[in-house]
Image: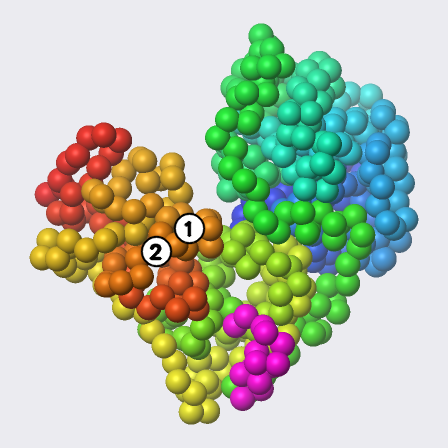
Amino acid sequence: MKIEQIYTGCIAQAAYYLESNGEAAIFDPLREVQPYIDKAAKDNAKIKYIFETHFHADFVSGHLDLAKKTGAQIVYGPTAAPEFDAVIATDNQEFKVGNYTIRAIHTPGHTLESTCYLLIDENDSIHGIITGDTLFIGDVGRPDLAQALTSDLTQEVLASHLYDSLRNKIMVLPDDITVYPSHGAGSACGKNMSKETTDTLGNQKKTNYALRADMTKEEFTAELLDGLGAPPAYFPQNVLMNIKGYESLDTILEKGVKPLTAKELEATATSTGAIVLDVRHENDFVKQHVPNSIFIGLHGGFAPWVGALIRDVNQPILLVTPEGKEEETVTRLARVGFDNTLGFLKGGIDAWTAAGFKTESIRSISPEEFAEGLAKNPITVVDSRKPGEYSGGHVADALNIPLDFVNEQLAEVPKEGDYYLHCAGGYRSVIMASILKARGYHNMINVEKGFGGIKNTTVQVVTGQTSCSNS
């Protein structure tokens, strides 16, 4: 038997491949399914089942394409009601994959249909449990996603279900089994996930705050909901795509990986209202970019930031990419449901300027120049990091406008006079600058390397209530 975690760091998501005696199963597949097909072919195995732990909110699953291409059956847990053919398992229903048995364990809480899958070997011993978003390493799934679709499923109601599921269905299992969750640190599906992506259940009982043996339901609910920020706006749209179905990724790629001249790109943007999304490195964008384009670089947390900031998965998108990254970009957009890519700028920014079109730039300075300039002229500093990062240390008197909430806090952005803009390392501040420029704000000065560079200068920084000056 083989059980393999297939982890995709940019969206902090884990799919699983299980193979036994010529049969295979895939758990929570990503949108691009060919790697799973290739893996099974290499093992001379037939993919028999596609197990879904729930209707995902943070990505669009590849279940439909994979089923179509392999003939495998899609399996959901109890109460799921997909609008396509699928097996709806009963609680404790078992499925055979070679010599292995997969037992569906209904664990409502993250969502109502959430289901874990026990991996049972030929000796009837439990090897592990695929927990989806019910149990993470160091955390459990957030219970506030279903209310966007069903108003009576409040976060308190689902938190109560989750408490019962964890204690009655998971914590009673043997301590030595391996926990295989769907996400790790960086995912918005929880608030305190570890960078580790597997662990023993026994160790989680000792270290995971949500699995304390003496915890009451009221204490569990209070701790689970404490500090839980609003989920990204695209989450409910992804849930609906996973329930209702979607276009094949092959079709999305055919439409999206379409080369356009500069004139064609401009005409398409004008006629469709498409956003021009620039996914190059922030240093390249700062120097030169298409006017009103939005920067979200491929090398950072690309897909989640697209979802959080563009929000509407139906938004038409045109691309400016590094050469050779066109298909990767369209694929990564499709992972989070942004299927309406209309093409890319052939020849990149050089082709744009060669066609006689103007470009724009962002004023950008080094941390040392920032320190010198701030000492001479103490203008406003805008910190685009998350509140937790800000409270852990920030430039004295800096205004905290997190990138996540730039649309909601637009009125707080200085309209008159120049201001400095920074993040942690230089990626998020350029995203924010591009959004602000597209909305008519042009008075920002980006600080390269962000707070990581700033704290090594003479600029006064504050940690908590203590003021200090680095030297």
Q: Is residue 218 magenta?
A: no
Q: Is residue 15 above or below residue 135?
A: below
Mark-to-mark CA distance, 1 and 2: 7 Å
Q: Is residue 129 visible?
A: no
Residue sticking out furthest to the top: 214
Magenta-highlighted residues: 263-276
Q: Tag 1's secondary structure?
A: loop
Q: Amino acid at mark 2?
A: Val
Foreground pick, 425 / 225: 225
Quarter of the rendering containing residue 105:
top right
Q: Which residue is mark 1?
A: 409
Q: Which residue is mark 2?
A: 413
Residue pictured at 52% horizontal, 72% vertical: 276
Q: Main secondary structure of the magenta part?
A: helix
Is 234 on the left or on the right of 25, as rendered?
Answer: left
User: Does the CB distance between marks 1 and 2 fall below 8 Å?
Assistant: yes
Q: Is residue 275 magenta?
A: yes
Q: Is residue 1 above or below residue 272?
A: above
